[in-house]
């Protein structure tokens, strides 16, 4: 049985080195981070060599392989937008995110495709796929093999990426020569909120993952492990701590027993217990500690 690489999106107060140290304090084997403030496009922000070197050194000391580090792109990137200016800026922001992620040498950056607005959903998918292609053509591949990964969405309003069909259409816009540099991942809260039956039974959950794998042609490249504050099919993206939401704890046991959770980052994005953290505080958040302990108890023997 291959390893499961558990981690979280850890607070980066004090910089990314401190984020790595907080991940290490919880004995995480993976982690997620921002490379720029997530409420801005970040299309002009570059990765500075001293920060890159310090981050890589900290990750090596923590025993966290760079291929198991995820970057989450800015929330404001709306690559599906029908407004040319917004779509172009989001496309540039995604390319810049790939540039920074590649500089840090991490395994992947993920992004939310955005909203179709009042446009045709299929055309919105195509715009999101074209943004991926633009990023891959703009940023040369390096030895780290950093990938651009689509994250499924909860489906609120006109947001794209709630279904396997939509993600498959986005990825179909990427030429075969670049296809290995992209893919997708699944967020459990988003699956549940979008009406996917991941909490009914192990068989029903496997059927959901089978559908994504069949329609897209590959397994997910990561999982975001989040319980849900809102009911099944609500289309609301509000995360809860594992076992404290409406998904419940047991479906996460099923997921960790599924072979598709092997060898990829499994990232918590659940609420932290501490509202604020000092920049020099490298201790783990108690909520992350509890969640990690629970998830480890679900790992296959």
Image: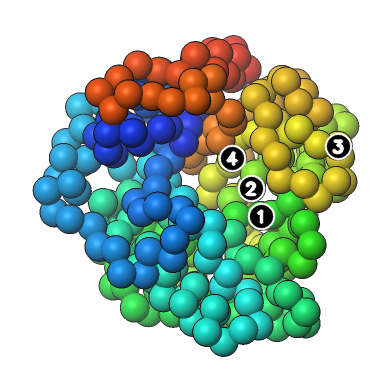
> At numbered mark 3, what does the secondary structure look like: helix, strand or loop?
loop
Residue 47 as seen in the image, left or right of residue 129: left
Relative height, residue 104 to residue 203 (above, below):
below
Q: Earlier in the sequence, mark 4 or mark 3?
A: 4
> At numbered mark 2, what does the secondary structure look like: helix, strand or loop?
strand
Mark 1 and mark 4: Cα distance apart in space: 10 Å
Q: Nearer the viewer, mark 4 or mark 3?
A: 3
> Dot 3: few (<14), some (14–19), or many (≥20) neighbours within 10 Å?
some
The quarter holding residue 168 reads: bottom right
Relative height, residue 208 to residue 12 (above, below):
below
Q: Earlier in the sequence, mark 1 or mark 4?
A: 1
The quarter holding residue 253 reads: top right
Q: Which mark is residue 231?
A: 3
Asked whether the viewer can see residue 209, the reply is no
Asked whether the viewer can see residue 97, the reply is yes
- Residue 249 screen position, x and y as percent: 73, 21
Q: Nearer the viewer, mark 2 or mark 3?
A: 3
Circles 1 and 2: CB atoms closer than 8 Å: yes
Q: Which mark is residue 152?
A: 1
Mark 4 and mark 2: Cα distance apart in space: 6 Å
Q: Which mark is residue 186?
A: 2
Relative height, residue 72 to residue 139 (above, below):
above
- Residue 268 screen position, x and y as percent: 55, 32
Q: Earlier in the sequence, mark 1 or mark 3?
A: 1
Circles 4 and 2: CB atoms closer than 8 Å: yes
């Amino acid at each position: 049985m291959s390893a499961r690489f558990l981690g979280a999106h850890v607070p980066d107060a004090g910089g990314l080195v401190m984020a790595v140290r907080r991940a290490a304090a919880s004995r995480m084997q993976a982690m997620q981070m921002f490379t720029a403030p997530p409420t801005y496009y970040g299309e002009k922000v570059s990765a500075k060599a001293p920060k890159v070197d310090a981050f890589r050194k900290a990750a090596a000391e923590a025993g966290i392989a760079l291929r198991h580090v995820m970057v989450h792109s800015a929330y404001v990137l709306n690559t599906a937008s029908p407004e040319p200016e917004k779509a172009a800026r989001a496309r540039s922001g995604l390319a810049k995110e790939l540039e920074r992620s590649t500089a840090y040498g991490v395994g992947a950056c993920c992004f939310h495709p955005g909203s179709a607005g009042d446009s045709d959903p299929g055309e919105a998918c195509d715009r999101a796929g074209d943004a991926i292609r633009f990023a891959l053509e703009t940023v040369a591949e390096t030895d780290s093999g950093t990938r651009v990964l689509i994250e499924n969405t909860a489906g609120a309003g006109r947001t794209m990426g709630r279904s396997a069909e939509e993600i498959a259409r986005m990825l179909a816009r990427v030429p075969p020569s670049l296809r290995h540099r992209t893919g997708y991942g699944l967020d459990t809260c988003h699956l549940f909120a979008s009406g996917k039956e991941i909490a009914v039974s192990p068989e029903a959950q496997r059927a959901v993952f089978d559908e994504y794998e069949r329609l897209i042609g590959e397994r997910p490249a990561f999982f975001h492990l989040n319980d849900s504050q809102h009911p099944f099919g609500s289309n609301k993206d509000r995360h809860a701590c594992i076992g404290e939401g409406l998904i419940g704890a047991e479906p996460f046991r099923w997921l960790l027993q599924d072979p598709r959770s092997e060898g990829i980052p499994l990232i918590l994005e659940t609420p932290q217990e501490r509202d604020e953290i000092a920049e020099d505080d490298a201790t783990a958040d108690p909520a992350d500690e509890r969640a990690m302990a629970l998830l480890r108890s679900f790992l296959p023997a």
